[in-house]
Image: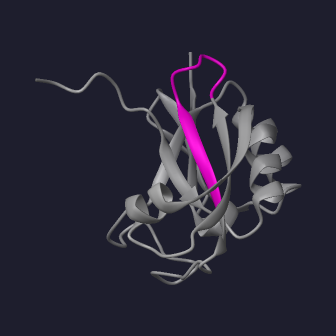
Amino acid sequence: MTIQRMDHVSVVVDDLEAAIAFFVELGMELEGQAQIEGPSVDRLNALDGVRAAIAMVRTPDGHGRLELTKFHAPAAVSAEPKNALGNTLGLRSVMFAVDDIDATVARLRAHGAELVGELAQYEDSYRLCYLRGPEGIIVALAEQLG
């Protein structure tokens, strides 16, 4: 048996509205929001008394999705330094293909994003950068050249 698809990546955030605004500004579409709680949610998460708000955002082509989760109870905990670099174990970045990297960086800076390094060109193929987005997640951007 094989998997059917990758459904989504989950990102736990402290400020759900700011995270939604960031990813919508990037070009993702808000698919929906919900409050989740109850015994099945507790069992799934191996936590007691889970109360959380979630928002699902998707890429314009409908193939990529992020679940943004704000835990109201129990409180979220930090597993690593807030400004972890690219060589830190675990999920480090989520990459998006964009058509105008300069304009995208400018729009995301208005939502608090900061470049991790520099915007760089890789051979004659791509212009690339890493931005630190909500909750310190590294958002990678790639603009194909030519």
Q: Is residue 62 above or below residue 142?
A: above
On the picture, is 123 further left or further right than 144? left
Give x and y (percent) for residue 9: 47, 45
Is residue 108 inside the magenta stretch? no
Q: Quadrant of the C terminus?
A: top right
On the picture, is 88 further left or further right than 121? left
Q: Is residue 2 above or below residue 132?
A: above
Is residue 62 inside the magenta stretch? yes
Q: Give the tally of numbered discs.
A: 0
Give x and y (percent) for residue 44: 39, 58
Q: Residue at x 51, y 84 (%)?
A: 81
Q: Return the residue nearer the eye: 28 or 77.
A: 77
Give x and y (percent) for residue 39: 49, 61
Q: Could you say which quadrant of the image residue 11 lies in? A: bottom right
Which residue appears farthest toward the left when viewing the image? Answer: 1
On the picture, is 26 further left or further right than 116? right
Q: Return the residue nearer the eye: 146 or 50.
A: 50
- What's the magenta region? 59-69
Q: Residue at x 58, y 46 (%)?
A: 67
Which residue appears farthest toward the front when viewing the image? Answer: 39
Q: Residue at x 10, y 23 (%)?
A: 1
Question: Is there any visible trace of residue 91 in the rendered image?
Answer: no
Question: Is there any visible trace of residue 66 in the rendered image?
Answer: yes
Q: Is residue 65 above or below residue 74?
A: above
Q: Could you say which quadrant of the image residue 77 lies in? A: bottom right
Q: Residue at x 51, y 42 (%)?
A: 95
